[in-house]
Image: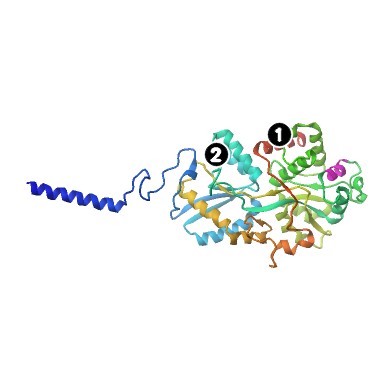
């Protein structure tokens, strides 16, 4: 009997050893060996854990439409290189996307607005509402620049020559304000009476990043500061300055591309000067040739960068596998080849190892130098924090569009 019990015991021990070897000593809580990461804690999303993307992992990428052509092209290449990851692209205005994310109506895996101002607004509002971070504050998931483009003036050269003379060499908001608020129009700063009133173009600051950036630069020039505080926006003389400039805008379009196209289509009869992204200007300069005279790019004394930040959200709807797939996608977009490709779409690469000027015929920073496009950019202001963005919008709505 004892011999039989010994045989049974030996058999049980042998089976146990086989099972232990087959599982590699893994434990269900992720401890020991090379076990999978634990599930993320509620409310923190997948940023606290990682897992390899499984076959068929799908991620949703919400992006600002200014970079649609580039992101469509590079995402197609990504699909070829990573067939196991399905990327669903959703083009959406930066402020609309920010509000939808905060409201819970939009739940992307990755978000890339046009600039850090829009992202700062969403981060601030999310923190206020949920008492949690929308993005990781460090590491691969934290927002990082994807593409760069500064805000510029685009003007018909004869108009720009007058503004440059009135401003001392760089087109200024104060010179524009003087011409706009004077009943004399262009003659107030030495322009031709035939030009009539100054016709300024920029987008609606509550709907479009470039419009908000224009409002931000007006504010910085008036205050003489490099960084705005909320209290700066409450001063009556400042508000009158902004209100005066905005008299020159006949219609606040929701899209930078829309009114830039109209500027080329209708010429100075509709816009004398406009405030746009450099990338948008680059895409339209060739279309203006032979239509209404020379259309050129001019860089303000102080500009602001649209850095198209991209980050993986910490929302609890993002699984560890999706987070890892998103990291792979973001790394692909930031790779040297895809950054270099951005040049042909008028963007400056965020990767500083990629030269902006080259001998390639498709490089606009070489081909359009005669139209004012230049590598050297004036000093740029830091993007405003979320509370300043929110109050800029509120001030504009109260003062300009009561």
Q: Quadrant of residue 282?
A: bottom right
Residue at x 61% of width, y 42% of height: 98
**Which quadrant is the C terminus positioned in?**
top right
Q: Position of residue 393 (x, y in %)?
A: 70, 37
Could you say whether the residue bearing mark 2 is in a helix, strand or loop? loop
Residue 118's disc is none
Q: Is residue 374 visible?
A: yes
Quarter residue 213 falls in:
top right
Question: Looking at the image, which is closer to me, 150 or 261?
Answer: 150
- On the picture, is 189 further left or further right than 147? right
Residue identifier under label 2: 133
Left or right, 297 with respect to 344, comes to right
**Residue sitting at 35 percent across and 44 percent down?**
28
Tell whether 383 sits left or right of 267.
Answer: left
Q: Nearest the camera: 349 or 130?
A: 349
Q: Is residue 271 visible?
A: no
Magenta stretch, main secondary structure class: helix
| Extent of the magenta region | 174-181
Cα gap from disc 2 to disc 1, whole angstroms: 23 Å
């Amino acid at each position: 009997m004892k011999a039989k019990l010994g045989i049974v015991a030996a058999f049980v021990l042998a089976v146990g050893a086989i099972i232990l070897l087959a599982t590699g000593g893994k434990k269900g809580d992720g401890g020991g060996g090379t076990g999978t990461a634990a599930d993320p804690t509620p409310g923190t999303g997948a940023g606290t854990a990682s897992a390899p993307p499984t076959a068929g992992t799908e991620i949703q990428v919400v992006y600002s439409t200014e970079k649609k052509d580039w992101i469509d092209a590079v995402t197609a290449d990504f699909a070829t290189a990573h067939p196991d990851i399905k990327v669903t692209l959703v083009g959406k205005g930066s402020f609309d996307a920010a509000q939808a994310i905060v409201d819970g109506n939009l739940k992307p895996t990755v978000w890339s607005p046009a600039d850090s101002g829009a992202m700062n607004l969403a981060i601030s509002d999310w923190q206020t509402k949920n008492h949690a971070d929308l993005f990781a504050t460090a590491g691969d998931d934290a927002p990082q620049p994807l593409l760069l483009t500064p805000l510029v003036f685009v003007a018909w050269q004869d108009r720009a020559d007058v503004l440059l003379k009135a401003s001392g060499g760089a087109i200024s908001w104060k010179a524009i304000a003087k011409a706009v608020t004077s009943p004399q129009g262009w003659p107030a700063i030495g322009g031709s009476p035939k030009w009539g009133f100054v016709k300024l173009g920029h987008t609606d600051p509550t709907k479009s990043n470039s419009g908000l950036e224009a409002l931000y630069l007006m504010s910085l020039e008036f205050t003489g500061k490099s960084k705005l505080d909320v209290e700066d926006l409450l001063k009556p003389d400042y508000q009158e300055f902004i209100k005066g400039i905005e008299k020159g805008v006949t219609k606040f379009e929701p899209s930078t591309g829309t009114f830039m196209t109209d500027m080329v289509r209708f010429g100075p009869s509709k816009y004398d000067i406009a405030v746009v992204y450099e990338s948008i200007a680059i895409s339209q300069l060739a279309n203006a040739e032979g239509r209404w005279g020379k259309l050129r790019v001019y860089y303000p004394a102080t500009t602001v960068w649209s850095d198209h930040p991209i980050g993986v959200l910490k929302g609890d709807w993002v699984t560890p596998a999706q987070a890892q797939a998103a990291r792979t996608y973001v790394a692909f977009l930031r790779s040297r080849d895809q950054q270099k490709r951005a040049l042909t779409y008028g963007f400056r690469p965020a990767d500083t190892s990629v030269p902006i000027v080259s001998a390639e015929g498709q490089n606009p920073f070489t081909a359009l130098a005669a139209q004012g496009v230049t590598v050297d950019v004036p000093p740029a202001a830091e993007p405003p924090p979320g509370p300043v963005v929110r109050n800029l919008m509120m001030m504009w709505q109260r003062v300009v569009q009561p």
